[in-house]
Amino acid sequence: MKPRVSVNFYTSTHIMTNNLNKIERLWNRMIVFWSGSKLTHCSIRLETEDDDISLFLMYRRAAELLPTKTLDRFVGGTPDYVFEIGELDFDLTKVERLIKGDYRVTPAAVLLWFFVTRPFCNWKPKTCATSVCEMLRAGGLDVGMHVAPVALFKELKNEFNYDSRKS
């Protein structure tokens, strides 16, 4: 069965930012400053008749698939923006293989990419946006590989004629 897929976006004013420690708040502010956008986080949601799971990947935490209700409770509410992608052709074992191991956001890698390797290297650090892009690609959707959530948001906005809903 093909899961229904949506991509969720969170802003710097989302209630989840109340749960961040000082370092995570600083990181959140840096994302806003560097990207020029209040979009600071994204995730992907996969729904089938039997399951409703979302990817959880945040600063220095290993990626994992969680029941969407658990994620919503953890982050303190629903996303700020949701793009309904539709049904994509991949199974959950393939998704789990993508994120297994030590798939986590590391600030040092993001800073290295932003200040040093970005202009001349195809390598991209692991971020919430790159993980969502990898999962969308695994499902057969042709999207670019983005590091910042705002870049993915803009591509989806153009691709799907901004058929998003504000939660």
Image (spheres, grey):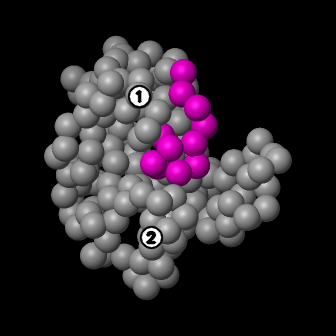
Name the image quarter holding residue 81. top left
Q: Which mark is residue 28?
A: 2
- Three-letter amino acid code of the residue under disc 2: Asn
Task: Identify the residue at horizontal 77%, vertical 42% (top origin).
Answer: 122
Q: Which residue is mark 1?
A: 158
The residue tagged with tag 2: helix, strand or loop?
Answer: helix
Query: Eyeballing the image, is 12 above or below 55?
Result: below
Residue 59 % position (x, y) = 50, 66
**Could you tell me which quadrant the N terminus lies in?**
top left
Q: Measured along the vertical axis of the image, is residue 56 above or below residue 132?
A: below
Q: Is residue 63 above or below residue 13?
A: above
Side of 130 relative to 166 (left or right):
right
Q: How many numbered circles are shown?
A: 2
Residue type pointed to by label 1 = Asn
Q: Which mark sits nearer the N-terminus, 1 or 2?
A: 2
Q: Residues within 10 Å of mark 2 (few under 14, many from 20)?
A: many
Task: List x then y, in percent, for residue 151.
Answer: 50, 44
Describe residue 108's horizontal placement relative to residue 98 as left or right.
Answer: right
Residue drawn at x 34%, y 48% is 9
Q: Which residues are magenta?
A: 142-152
Q: Secondary structure at mark 1?
A: helix
Measured as percent of width and height from the top left, residue 63 is found at 50, 53
> Can residue 15 be seen from the camera position used here?
yes
Secondary structure mostly seen in the magenta stretch:
loop
